[in-house]
């Protein structure tokens, strides 16, 4: 096995283990159903930068499978699978769209379709009781308001991903390179 392959496996394993740990901690800490998958998704970025998008996608798939099997909070695991896990990888492609309005519309479309599909599957296919009860008690206005607030949070997440990416490239990556 070449040294590059060993480094790829080791770094991917470390970041994957960190992401799963974050997902498990998210199941313990109240109100972290959205923060934990967001942070776990950010942990895929260094692997994608160092070894390419295909390695990042492979890591996303591995984390997704593990999260679905071992994370007690299935809503949190599904949030990672349906959006927070792959979006940091997709963002790099969407950021290449030069028209900012079109870029924002595409990002918003991806977010809204993913969230609506995820909750649709959780409610109608898997019949997750606490989500069905929670949404059943809420009125249509409240659900629309919740989706709008989700979009605001998504914009903040998108900005955080951009800054995290820049931070990694400017501050952290040069330290990795010095180690070689």
Image (spheres, rainbow, N blue to C red):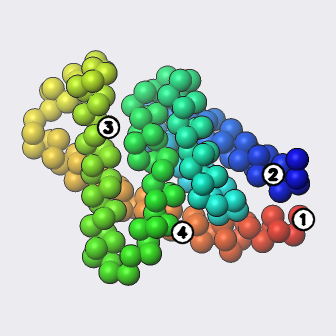
In percent of width and height, residue 56 lies at 60, 52
Residue at image point 87% right, 69% down: 178
In the image, residue 174 sits, relative to residue 118, either above or below, namely below
Residue 137 percent coordinates (x, y): 15, 26
Which residue is drawn at the image coordinates 50% and 57% (left, top)?
88
- From mark 4 to mark 3, how far is it between C-alphas? 27 Å
Label 4 or label 3, whichever lies nearer to me, is 3
- Within-10-Å neighbours for mark 3: few <14, some 14–19, many 20+: some
| Mark before the other along the chain sequence, 2 or 3 | 2
Which class describes the residues within 10 Å of circle 4: few (<14), some (14-19), or many (20+)? few
Whole-Å distance between the Cαs marked 2 and 1? 15 Å
User: Considering the numbered disc 1 on the image, is that residue within a helix, a strand or a loop?
Assistant: loop
Quadrant where the C terminus sits is bottom right
Marks 1 and 3: in contact by CB < 8 Å?
no
User: CA separation, marks 3 and 1?
Assistant: 42 Å
Which residue is the site of mark 4?
Answer: 163
Which residue was labeled with disc 3? 118
Q: Secondary structure at mark 2?
A: helix
Q: Earlier in the sequence, mark 3 or mark 1?
A: 3
Q: Earlier in the sequence, mark 4 or mark 3?
A: 3
Q: Is residue 6 left or right of residue 120?
A: right
Residue 40 shown left or right of residue 16 in the figure:
left
Q: Mark 1 — residue?
A: 180
The residue at which mark 2 appears reads as: 5
Closer to the N terminus: mark 4 or mark 2? 2
């Amino acid at each position: 096995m070449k040294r590059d392959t060993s480094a790829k496996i080791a770094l991917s394993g470390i970041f994957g283990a960190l992401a799963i740990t974050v997902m498990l901690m998210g199941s313990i800490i109240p109100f972290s159903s959205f923060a934990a998958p967001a942070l776990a998704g950010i942990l895929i970025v260094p692997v994608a930068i160092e070894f390419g998008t295909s390695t990042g996608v492979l890591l996303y798939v591995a984390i997704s499978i593990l999260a679905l099997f071992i994370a007690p909070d299935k809503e949190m695991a599904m949030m990672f699978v349906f959006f927070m896990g792959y979006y940091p990888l997709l963002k790099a492609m969407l950021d290449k769209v030069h028209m900012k309005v079109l870029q924002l519309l595409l990002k918003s479309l991806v977010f809204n379709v993913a969230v609506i599909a995820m909750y649709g599957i959780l409610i109608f296919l898997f019949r997750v009781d606490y989500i069905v009860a929670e949404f059943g008690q809420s009125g249509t206005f409240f659900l629309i308001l919740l989706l709008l607030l989700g979009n605001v949070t998504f914009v903040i997440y998108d900005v955080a991903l951009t800054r995290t990416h820049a931070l990694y490239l400017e501050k952290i990556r040069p330290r990795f390179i010095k180690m070689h």
